[in-house]
């Protein structure tokens, strides 16, 4: 998900009411010009965009979230409308929806920033929750993980296993693995991991032993990891 602004995006919609908008075909007009759809412009599922709705004399400006499935635009935050309010206008079924710069976006005022991040603000509770240890499991000799699932992870080493490259990388993210040994099992790593001397992870052997692997995602396909062994 990203906040994006794309050029010459304007589509028709047959949606009525104040809910999520089903996006239709691009507006094409000899006088007004030829536009493209959200998808054609490269807007991806979950992207957040500044939008303008025009429905006759009525209009609405806000921040919306694009949903690729069904080609929809969720009216996430309404900033203003033709009635001088901040509520969604009721559409007639013949409106047009465009991506448009909003007053205050150049220089990004605090008000617009808050609107763009509404519902995504980080609270202290969210920070604490994000630091909680996320347990991983061994399946088919592999340990799969997604960097978006947490910061700190637990690997109960109950068999020989390989820690796979993350299914989703988050560059510049750091965190740690707690490796809880159950015997004399080994833990390999995927090709995206880089270890001191390229020697891989030499985890401590012996039931009850605990090692800590500290990782730093330095690029979209590269995770540096160092091991603190046999912590007691």
Image (cartoon, rainbow, N blue to C red):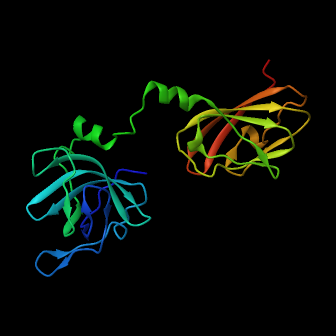
Left or right: where 192 falls relative to 109: right
The spot of residue 198 in percent (x, y) is 75, 43
- Tell me what residue is drawn at x 64 percent, y 36 percent: 215
Q: Nearer the viewer, residue 7 or 226?
A: 7
The spot of residue 232 in percent (x, y) is 80, 17
Q: Nearer the viewer, residue 92 or 82?
A: 92
The residue most toward the front is: 17
- Tell me what residue is drawn at x 38 percent, y 35 percent: 121
The residue most toward the left is: 57
Left or right: where 103 falls relative to 138: left
Q: Can I make out residue 228 in this image?
A: no
Q: In the picture shown, does residue 89 fall above or below 186? A: below
Q: In the picture shown, does residue 91 fall above or below 113? A: below
The residue most toward the bottom is: 30
User: How many numbered circles are shown?
Assistant: 0
- Tell me what residue is drawn at x 23 percent, y 62 percent: 98
Q: Nearer the viewer, residue 3 or 19?
A: 19
The spot of residue 214 in percent (x, y) is 66, 32
Choose top left, top right, bottom left or bottom right for residue 94. Answer: bottom left
- Tell me what residue is drawn at x 78 percent, y 42 percent: 200
Left or right: where 218 falls relative to 138: left
Q: Nearer the viewer, residue 101 or 203?
A: 101
Choose top left, top right, bottom left or bottom right for residue 24. Answer: bottom left
Q: In the picture shown, does residue 127 fall above or below 29? A: above
The spot of residue 180 in percent (x, y) is 80, 31
Q: In the picture shown, does residue 182 fall above or below 146? A: above
Q: Can I make out residue 97 in this image?
A: yes
């Amino acid at each position: 998900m990203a906040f994006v602004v794309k050029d010459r995006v304007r589509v028709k919609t047959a949606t009525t009411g104040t809910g999520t908008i089903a996006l239709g075909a691009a507006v094409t007009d000899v006088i007004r010009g030829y536009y493209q759809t959200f998808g054609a412009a490269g807007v991806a599922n979950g992207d957040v965009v500044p939008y303008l709705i025009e429905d006759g004399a009525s209009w609405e400006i806000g921040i919306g979230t694009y949903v690729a499935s069904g080609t929809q635009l969720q009216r996430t935050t309404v900033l203003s409308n033709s009635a001088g309010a901040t509520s969604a206008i009721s559409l007639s079924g013949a409106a047009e929806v465009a991506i448009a710069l909003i007053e205050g976006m150049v220089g990004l005022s605090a008000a617009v920033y808050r609107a763009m991040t509404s519902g995504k603000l980080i609270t202290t509770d969210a920070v604490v929750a994000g630091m909680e240890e996320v347990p991983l499991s061994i399946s088919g000799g592999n340990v799969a993980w997604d960097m978006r699932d947490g910061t700190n992870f637990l690997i109960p080493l109950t068999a020989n296993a390989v820690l796979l490259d993350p299914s989703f990388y988050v560059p510049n993210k750091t965190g740690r693995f707690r490796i809880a040994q159950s015997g004399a099992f080994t833990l390999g790593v995927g090709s995206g991991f880089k270890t001191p001397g390229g020697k891989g992870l030499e985890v401590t052997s012996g039931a009850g032993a605990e090692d800590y692997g500290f990782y730093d995602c330095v690029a979209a396909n590269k995770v540096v990891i160092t091991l603190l062994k046999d912590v007691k």
